[in-house]
Amino acid sequence: MRVSVNGVRIYFEVVGEKLQLRDGALVEVPTLLVLHGGPGFDHNGLRPFYDRFADIAQVIYLDHRGNGRSEQGDIATLNLFQWGDDIKAFCDALDIEKPIVLGHSFGGFVAESYLTRHPEHPGKVILSCTQGRSGKEESFAVYRRLGGEYAEQVARNVFDEASAENLIEFERVCRPLYNRSDGHGLATRPGIFTPQTLVYFWRDGVGPHDGAWRDFSFLDSLSKVTCPVLILGGEDDPACPISFQEEIVAALPDGIGEFHRFADCGHGSHRDAPVETERIIRQFLLGTSRHLS
């Protein structure tokens, strides 16, 4: 399905009912809006894990503009500020009130943009293996620790120039370092890769007002947050090292953030620690349902 959002058609999929029948009564459950990583990918990689929460929430996945099956629009709109505004506009278009927004990796960047630009809009936010500012030296150090000097150099090469050759070598050498497990048998669905979106996001010559990879930060704006925020991080994550999640927690107002760090876990606790991650997220989601009269 697609819906018009800020001048482009955004693709989305819905898993589960908003009104669920329980013990003969209709119960309105919260909406869990899942934001995929990338950019340049789609939501398919998150489906195998997050579908399971459809028993206590209506789960909605979308492809960000310029990603997956969504329209791109003007290439200049491929920035974190627009992507963040798209989340609010998407919810408004579908009459979703107080969503629980979960952003993984790059999806976490988008979730932070949405959260800081529209702090009164979300009911709750979940940030999975993400970061609040640009930065790569922290990542290079983890690539070196996990894969040695060559892995570090391959990572540096792709961040210096996102050429096809460098991306291919990165997939061969560095991508296997993302997780400490094989995903515990999670099924995969064919995905769509849009390299031009990734390359544009990583381009040189940007400043803090461009909403691009090389110079963004939401840390100062996190002080405006009023809703509960769950932060998940892996201690062996080379893409978004655990120190970045520590920064997010420190930037949030006291009592707002709930931080869980996972040992022997890489980029995505839902892959390396699925049982514990499910337990934590379920606990965070529960208590938001209300019975309809």
Image (spheres, helix red, strand yellow):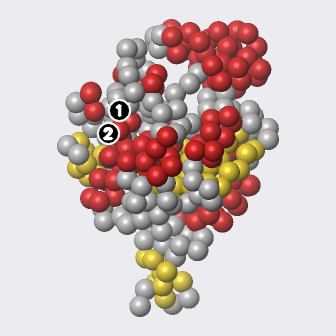
In the image, what residue type sits under mark 2?
Gln
- Give residue 88's position: percent from left, percent from top: 34, 53
| Residue 51 can be seen, yes or no | no
* Residue that label 1 marks: 79
Tell me whether circle 1 and circle 2 mark residues in contact (CB < 8 Å): yes
Question: Between residues 214 and 267, which one lies in front from this camera angle?
Answer: 214
Q: Compared with residue 76, is residue 115 higher up or lower down, i.e. above or below? A: below
Q: Measured from the top left, where is residue 207 in percent x and y? A: 38, 22
* Residue at (70, 20) in percent of width and height: 141
Q: Is residue 273 left or right of residue 229?
A: right
Query: Which class describes the residues within 10 Å of circle 1: few (<14), some (14-19), or many (20+)?
Result: some
Residue reaching furthest to the right? 263
- Distance of mark 1 from mark 2, alpha carbons? 6 Å
User: Mark 2 = which residue?
Assistant: 82
Q: Which secondary structure, mark 2?
A: helix
Inspect this view and state whether residue 39 appears: yes
Residue 169 vertical position relative to residue 275 in the rendered view, above or below: above
Vertical position of residue 145 compared to residue 235: above or below: above
Counting from the top left corner in percent of width and height, residue 108 is at 51, 42
Q: Is residue 217 left or right of residue 200?
A: right
Depth check, front residue: 28 or 185: 28
At horizontal 68% and vertical 59% (from top left) the residue drawn is 280
Crowding at dot 2, Cα within 10 Å, few <14 / some 14-19 / many 20+, comes out as some
Q: Residue at x 36, y 64 (%)?
A: 96
* Mark 1: secondary structure: loop
Q: Residue at x 29, y 53 (%)?
A: 89
Mark on residue 60? none
Amino acid type of the residue that numbered disc 1 sits on in the rendered structure: Asn
Q: Quadrant of residue 66?
A: top left
Horizontally, residue 181 falls left or right of residue 291, namely: right
